[in-house]
Amino acid sequence: MNTAAQWMRYTDIREVHGPLLVVAGVEGVGWDESVRIRFDDGTIRNGLVLEVDGDLAVVQVLEGTAGVDPAATALEFTGGPVHVAVGEGWLGRVCNGRGVPLDGGPPVPGRLEPITGSPLNPVRRDPPADPVLTGVSVVDVLATLVRGQKLPVFSMPGLPHLRLACQIAAQATAGGEPFCVIFAGMGLTHADAAYARDALEERSAAGELVLLLNLADDPVIERLLSPRLALTIAERLAFESGRHVLVVLTDMTNYADALREVSAARGEFPGRRAYPGYLYSDLASLYERCGRIIGQPGSVTIVPVLTMPGGDITHPVPDLTGYITEGQLILSAEQHARGVYPPVDVLSSLSRLMRNGAGAHRTRADHLPLAAQLLAVLAHARQSRELAELIGPDALGDLDRAHLEVEETFAAELMRQGFDESRPLEDSLDRAWRVLARLPRGALTMLPGELLDAHGLAAESE
């Protein structure tokens, strides 16, 4: 961290445009450099360098430029990126997107670290392993989240993605091992921010949550700081304090839109849909900060939530996110219209690392074959439904009708869940068995005979 004596101080402010200041005569200033704006009365605001052109620098003031008198204002360039205090003091705190307390408490103490961070060195990475149980049946049974994984939630606007994100953040556990959650909301409405605070109040009061809230009317540049701040805090809690840390980032589309706006302010050449050409590498610089380190007990797991404009999964943000992450949970407008919560499109969702976190000695020995059989049954049911639309439901065979009935039972018994209902994994897996028990044994071809016998399905084969 640069000391005050090393900071470069300039007073030649040429222009004030909205939240931007243009200062002249600068030397050795770089993009994304942290700036302190000091007034004659001792008031200090904070800013970031957006653009440098010769001896001119464009600075975005995070607190806005209202009341700025160019003749009585000095800018101090720190020579480095934004820093944040790290440590256990963050647990239980509610702050804005740049770490300023919103809960009436003092600033968070701790050692200062730059928020830029870097992806984990592949040589030091341990493969993701062991589950993070969310208490949400459809996720835990069919798309198990694994410690050190990055598993995004893709949603259309208007679906309850924020509610699901808050539920996961409120209920997630690491099987009794030290665990905490960092929830970073970006571009939230005031109503959404209030909902998140209420939904996560209990976990916050227990000292297991860091809540960062960037509102839609907060500075755009703050939206770019929020996920980096969250991940910097998470890294220290995980790899120095030995905790398993779940980082929930919502909404990453708002983050990408802020990146596009800042890129335009810098005069950069736009890429696809006017996003900067480095959108992929920028997202990767965030997502790849999760994982586990060889020889250390903690882990960082990321659940990024993003909305797909117009429901378009080929939009640059979900498209590039899908290349970087290890699976996806896709929310379904059809399920939502049927009143199912959480409205997950099961056959379009998957966790590519599920085998690393489920099965014997991790969840339950029957978990993986049970999940495979459920997916096979639901795929058959979808085919039967499409066939019924062509030839009529009366022309379906008995087995096809049975699969359609099981699909309805699955939605009612296992998938449908209360907003604040946390289900133990044992209960969720037992519900899955009760769903499959409605089919004849001969249709359950992906389950070993000993498992079918153990769950009382032997008689149906006779």
Image (cartoon, rainbow, N blue to C red):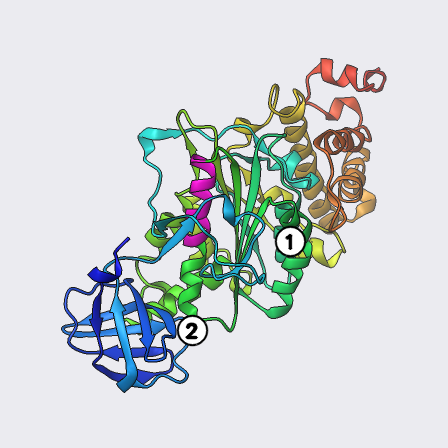
Q: Earlier in the sequence, mark 2 or mark 1?
A: 2
Query: In the rendered image, which quarter is residue 412 located in?
Result: top right
Task: Please state, as top left, top right, bottom left or bottom right, where the C terminus lies in the image.
Answer: top right
Task: Mark 2 and mark 1 in contact? Answer it, CB < 8 Å.
Answer: no
**Neighbour tally class for label 2: few under 14, some 14-19, many 20 plus, Cα within 10 Å:** some
Residue 238 among those drawn in magenta: yes
Q: Nearer the viewer, residue 177 or 443?
A: 177
Residue 115, given in percent of the width and then of the height, sits at 36, 52
Q: Secondary structure at mark 2?
A: loop
Query: Residue lying farthest top?
Result: 450
Q: Is residue 251 above or below residue 243?
A: below
- At label 2, the amino acid type is Glu
- At label 1, the amino acid type is Ser
Q: Residue at x 80, y 46 (%)?
A: 393
* Residue 267 visible from this viewpoint: no
Residue 411, given in percent of the width and then of the height, sits at 76, 44
Q: Is residue 292 above or below residue 249?
A: above
Query: Residue lying farthest front?
Result: 41
Q: Which residue is mark 1?
A: 332
Residue 63 marker: 2
Residue 424, given in percent of the width and then of the height, sits at 73, 34
Left or right placement of residue 424 versus residue 145 in this view: right
Left or right placement of residue 70 versus residue 257 in this view: left
First to last magenta residue range: 228-240
Residue 59 among those drawn in magenta: no
Left or right placement of residue 223 versus residue 385 in this view: left
